[in-house]
């Protein structure tokens, strides 16, 4: 037989083509079955994520609402004195925005670049109709700030729709016209500190979950069925209770007049006037989150431990290892896939946790997600929220990548 | 060490119950000499693994004493017993390489790395697996894993090695090959081996002595020849090799020979091995290869008329299924010789055997 000749089916068509024809119908059906879900995921997840990520680097509010000035700002070098021409166009745009009632949006956008400029825009816009040329002098007369170059630089930056500014802010830097990125001074850094705190709290929660969950998973996997079923129900019970109910239960338990403190006072560990503050701080966040995320550690661990036959431990002991040594050298290494899966799951869930820290976190128990929520709901700086979220997403992806390098994703067992 | 008279391993009146209701092992007495290869053979659920686990220390005896080297070991934990063990699924540690698996028992014993290397090398050579030292168990075939498990159980030079159906997962050819390897290793090292299997040919090939288990009781403990030639009860006769049974009643006993009237009415003689005396029901056992088919009654043989139901040509012999005294599963192996009579389905020749080859045993309730 000729090796280079493609193999053909009985009717002479190449076998590959024949196979593709035969597979086509079943492929079509498979595609039909997944299509609704795919459409749903695309519409409700993939598309919003990309839209949000886009917002993190793109904000055209200024460019859109200040059409006259925009061209002039773009060619301006950002250092020389603004020309009369630029002032004239500014007044025209302010009048238009005043009429369209959109001046608030412009003001907020510039205010994001340079704090304290909101009222400059709104109040000037109110008076814009009455201004007479030459506009430069007229504007500076109404508000002295119009003569300052940094206001114009801020406008030049906001005029740039595609901007790294929000990411810079997310990392406690400022993006300037002339000097590029500059780190903020130490005491004005908030986001990097918050990111580090988020990582530390998530790490602590993960370690606590591992420490508390490992023995439970071990019992689940080794106890006789009738006991392990009961234990499993107890592990799953929290899943059947509302997250809010569980979190508020922690408030009842941990607050300074709560159960734990009452007992501590009663036993004499704490004095009545110096009760421990266990909630509305980082401690509260860690305790409540550990409790809520514990099942996500236990279940992957359990599913791995379940598959480890008892003969390994027996073999180790018959070879002369003490029970402890057999456990550490033979049992624990085999549970690494479970620890990895549980750890990664808990860590990733913890990094993005929102409700619990919001309720029991107080000041120093807030996570980055609470800040994202703040910018989404209160300050309405969606672009900054998107940038913060983007950094979070990037961090998770890097973690995932590192995990894959160190332990291997296919080594992960979730169930 | 031991002096010659003391058994190396000794079960004394051992009983075991898991649930407090049924005895899985009933009054086990077993003595094993140093260097012996003893096999526990029996059907599934007869308590073989349980006995092995009690010896290894993973199960505690509910009653009775187990001694090792003259010392009771009931209260010694498994890791201090120094017993090598090969598990049915090999139980090679999946996260360690072959070499690390073998190193494990030596490291636990705190040996120097030079000593460890030498012993591991020697153990790997013994099973011809030196080349595979750096592989993970998952990268080995079943037979190779089996060898490593064997090497690991032997590397720390235990005096006693337990094997629980170590060849159960291998295909027939490999299993037979490994049987010889294990036998040779046993002969070369002189270790004592307690081996569990439910494959009778495996037991017959390898063992010095075989303990036939059924229902938590040792039915017979003997060397392979005795076990095959002189089964002491109907269970052993049935379980080991092929066997023809004929039910009847003892009519008289004299000098170890019983006269038995079969249920079909024929009278025959048999060795009285395990009967309850005159008038009791009995089951006669005759091996197929000890029967001859003759056209006429032959002097000196117990002969019964039979009818040929089926003939299977097997080359060296012809397997002949007959109805004899109401038993239509009566098998005779007729040697393939030149003078073989024209066997024919439906023919009615006589089947005969010597009294010495026919054993009157207890009635095994089915
Ligand atoms: N851990 C246990 N708990 C309760 N009963 C058990 C346990 N282990 C074994 N048994 C019971 O004890 C009896 C003997 O079991 P054992 O494992 O010793 O049989 P075996 O002879 O090794 O059988 P096999 O050839 O199938 O391996 C069985 O009826 C089994 O159900
Ligand atoms: Mg068994």
Image (cartoon, grey):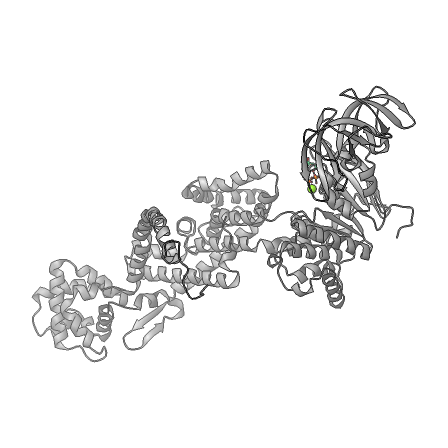
Question: Could you tell me if residue A322 is visible in this image?
Answer: no
Q: Is residue A251 left or right of residue B44?
A: left
Q: Quadrant of residue A58?
A: bottom left
The residue lying furthest to the bottom in this view is A80
How far from the left and from the top, in percent, is residue A207? 53, 55
Split into quadrants, the picture shows ligand 2 in the one at top right
Q: Is residue B336 left or right of residue A92?
A: right
How far from the left and from the top, in percent, is residue B286? 79, 32
Q: Quadrant of residue A192?
A: bottom left
Q: Is residue A122 left or right of residue A3?
A: left
How far from the left and from the top, in percent, is residue B186? 79, 54
Q: Nearer the viewer, residue B92 or A88?
A: B92
Q: Residue at x 14, y 73 (%)?
A: A87
Q: Quadrant of residue B342?
A: top right
Q: Nearer the viewer, residue B336 or A76?
A: B336
How far from the left and from the top, in percent, is residue B110? 75, 61
Q: Is residue B58 above or below residue A87?
A: above
Q: Nearer the viewer, residue B259 or A302?
A: B259
């Amino acid at each position: 037989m000729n090796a280079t000749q493609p193999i053909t089916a009985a009717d002479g068509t190449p076998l590959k083509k024949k196979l593709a024809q035969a597979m086509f119908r079943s492929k079509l059906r498979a595609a039909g079955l997944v299509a609704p879900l795919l459409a749903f995921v695309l519409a409700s997840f993939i598309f919003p994520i990309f839209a949000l990520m886009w917002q993190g680097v793109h904000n055209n509010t200024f460019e859109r609402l200040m059409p006259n000035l925009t061209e002039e700002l773009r060619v301006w070098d950002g250092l020389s004195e603004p020309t009369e021409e630029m002032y004239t166009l500014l007044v025209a745009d302010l009048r238009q925005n005043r009429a369209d009632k959109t001046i608030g949006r412009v003001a907020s956008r510039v205010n994001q670049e340079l704090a304290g400029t909101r009222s400059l825009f709104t109040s000037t816009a109110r008076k814009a109709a009455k201004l007479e040329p030459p506009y430069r002098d007229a504007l500076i007369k109404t508000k002295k700030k119009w003569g300052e170059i940094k206001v114009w630089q801020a406008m030049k930056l906001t005029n740039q729709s595609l901007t790294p500014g929000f990411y810079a802010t997310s990392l406690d830097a400022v993006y300037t016209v002339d000097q590029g990125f500059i780190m903020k001074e130490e005491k004005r850094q908030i986001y990097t500190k918050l990111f580090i705190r988020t990582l530390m709290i998530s790490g602590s929660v993960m370690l606590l979950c591992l420490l508390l969950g490992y023995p439970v998973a071990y019992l689940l996997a080794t106890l006789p069925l009738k006991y392990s079923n009961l234990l499993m129900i107890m592990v799953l019970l929290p899943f059947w209770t509302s997250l809010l109910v569980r979190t508020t239960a922690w408030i009842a338990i941990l607050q300074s007049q709560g159960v734990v403190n009452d007992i501590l006072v009663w036993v004499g560990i704490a004095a009545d006037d110096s009760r421990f503050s266990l909630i509305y701080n980082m401690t509260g966040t860690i305790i409540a989150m550990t409790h809520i995320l514990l099942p996500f550690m236990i279940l992957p661990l359990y599913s791995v431990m379940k598959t480890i036959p008892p003969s390994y431990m027996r073999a180790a002991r018959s070879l002369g290892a003490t029970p402890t040594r057999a456990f550490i050298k033979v049992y624990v290494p085999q549970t690494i896939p479970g620890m990895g899966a549980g750890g990664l799951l808990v860590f990733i869930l913890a990094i993005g946790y929102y409700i619990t820290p919001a309720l029991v976190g107080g000041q120093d128990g807030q996570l980055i997600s609470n800040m994202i929520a703040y910018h989404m709901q209160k300050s309405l700086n969606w672009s900054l929220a998107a940038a913060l979220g983007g950094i979070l997403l990037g961090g998770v992806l890097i973690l995932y990548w590192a995990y894959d390098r160190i332990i291997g994703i296919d080594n992960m067992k979730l169930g | 060490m031991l002096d010659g008279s003391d058994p190396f391993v000794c079960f004394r009146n051992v009983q075991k119950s898991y649930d407090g209701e049924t005895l899985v092992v009933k009054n086990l007495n077993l003595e094993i000499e140093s260097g012996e290869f003893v096999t526990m053979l029996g059907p599934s659920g007869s308590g073989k693994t349980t006995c092995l686990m009690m010896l290894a220390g993973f199960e505690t005896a509910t009653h009775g004493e187990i001694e090792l080297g003259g010392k009771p070991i009931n209260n010694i934990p498994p890791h201090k017993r120094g017993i090598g063990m090969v598990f049915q699924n090999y139980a090679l540690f999946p996260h360690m390489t072959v070499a690390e698996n073998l190193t494990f028992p030596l490291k636990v014993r705190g040996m120097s790395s030079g000593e460890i290397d030498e012993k591991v090398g020697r153990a790997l050579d013994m099973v011809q697996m030196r080349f595979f030292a750096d592989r993970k168990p998952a990268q080995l075939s079943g037979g190779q894993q089996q060898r490593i498990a064997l090497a690991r159980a032997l590397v720390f030079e235990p005096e006693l090695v337990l094997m629980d159906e170590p060849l159960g997962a291998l295909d027939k050819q490999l299993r037979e090959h490994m049987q010889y390897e294990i036998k040779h290793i046993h002969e070369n090292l002189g270790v004592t081996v307690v081996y569990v299997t439910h494959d009778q040919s495996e037991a017959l090939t390898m063992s010095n002595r075989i303990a036939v288990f059924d229902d938590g009781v040792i039915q017979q403990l003997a060397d392979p020849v005795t076990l095959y030639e002189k089964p002491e009860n109907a269970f052993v006769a049935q379980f080991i090799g092929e066997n023809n049974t004929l039910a009847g009643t003892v009519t008289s006993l004299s000098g170890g020979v019983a006269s038995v009237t079969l249920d079909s009415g024929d009278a025959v003689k048999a060795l009285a091995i395990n009967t309850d005396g005159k008038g009791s029901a009995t089951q006669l056992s005759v091996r197929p290869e000890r029967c001859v088919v003759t056209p006429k009654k032959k002097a000196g043989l117990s002969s019964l008329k039979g009818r040929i139901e089926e003939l299977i040509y097997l080359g060296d012999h012809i397997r002949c299924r007959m109805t004899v005294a109401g038993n239509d599963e009566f098998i005779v192996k007729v040697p393939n010789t030149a003078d073989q009579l024209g066997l024919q389905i439906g023919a009615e020749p006589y089947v005969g055997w010597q009294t010495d080859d026919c054993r009157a045993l207890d009635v095994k309730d089915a």
